[in-house]
Image: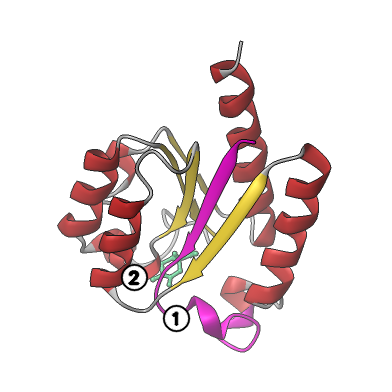
Amino acid sequence: MAKVFVIHGPNLGLLGERKPEIYGKYTLDDINSELEFLAKQADIEIDFLQSDSEGEIVSKVGQAKNKYDVIIINPAGYTHTSIAIRDAVEAAGIDTIEVHLSNIYNREEFRNKSLIAPVCVGQVSGFGKNSYVLAFQAALEIIKSASL
Ligand code: DQA
């Protein structure tokens, strides 16, 4: 069975109460439940990690090699700073989709640059909870075309 790994970076455990006008009213549990539902429908195994720690994210991406078909990652604040997460994604060699709830291109200038996106297959940014849903659909397409 194909496997997808969803990684939520720092402060995303606060979703629902953290700046809802920017990040939406949904909690992380709401997002994970929806993805779990979609995964079940598609017969895909799905695992989740929320971590505030850059080192833990680097380690878990490293351990994902040969275990997952696609990674969906919202690196949150580390998007704009973490060469270590970028290197881990590149080294893992797993098709990775970067996700953002907000549109990182119409906010503060420091959010306009992602260090991770260049080593990802693509990025979804600006659709709130649906950014994850769209990323999951993209993951399904990647899994489908890999099995052809
Ligand atoms: C975010 C955007 C980042 O700039 C920010 O640091 C976050 C969340 C998003 O999902 O919109 O924590 O990744």
Q: Residue 6 in the image: x percent, y percent?
A: 53, 56
Q: Secondary structure at mark 2?
A: helix
* Residue 145 visible in this rendered orientation of the protein: yes
Q: As rendered, which of 67 and 28 lies closer to the eye?
A: 67
Seen in the picture, residue 7 relative to 117 is either above or below; the reply is below
Question: Is residue 109 something one can see in this rendering?
Answer: no
The residue lying furthest to the bottom in this view is: 17
Task: Report x, y in % for residue 36.
Answer: 73, 57
| Helix, strand or loop under label 1 | loop
Confirm or reject: label 2 Cβ below 8 Å from ligand 1. Answer: yes
> What residue appears at the point 38 percent right and 38 percent down from the top-left corner?
66
Mark 1: few, some, or many residues within 10 Å (few <14, many ≥20)? some
Which mark is first along the chain, 1 or 2? Answer: 1
Quarter of the picture holding the C terminus: top right
Q: Which mark is residue 11?
A: 1
Q: Nearer the viewer, residue 71 or 47?
A: 47
Quick check: which quadrant has ligand 1?
bottom left
Task: Determine the residue located farthest toward the top in the rendered image.
Answer: 148
In this picture, which residue range is highlighted in magenta?
Answer: 1-20
Answer whether residue 5 is magenta in the image: yes
Is residue 43 rendered to the left or right of residue 12? right
Q: Quadrant of residue 117?
A: top left
Give amino acid for label 2.
Gly
What residue would you read off at disc 2? 77
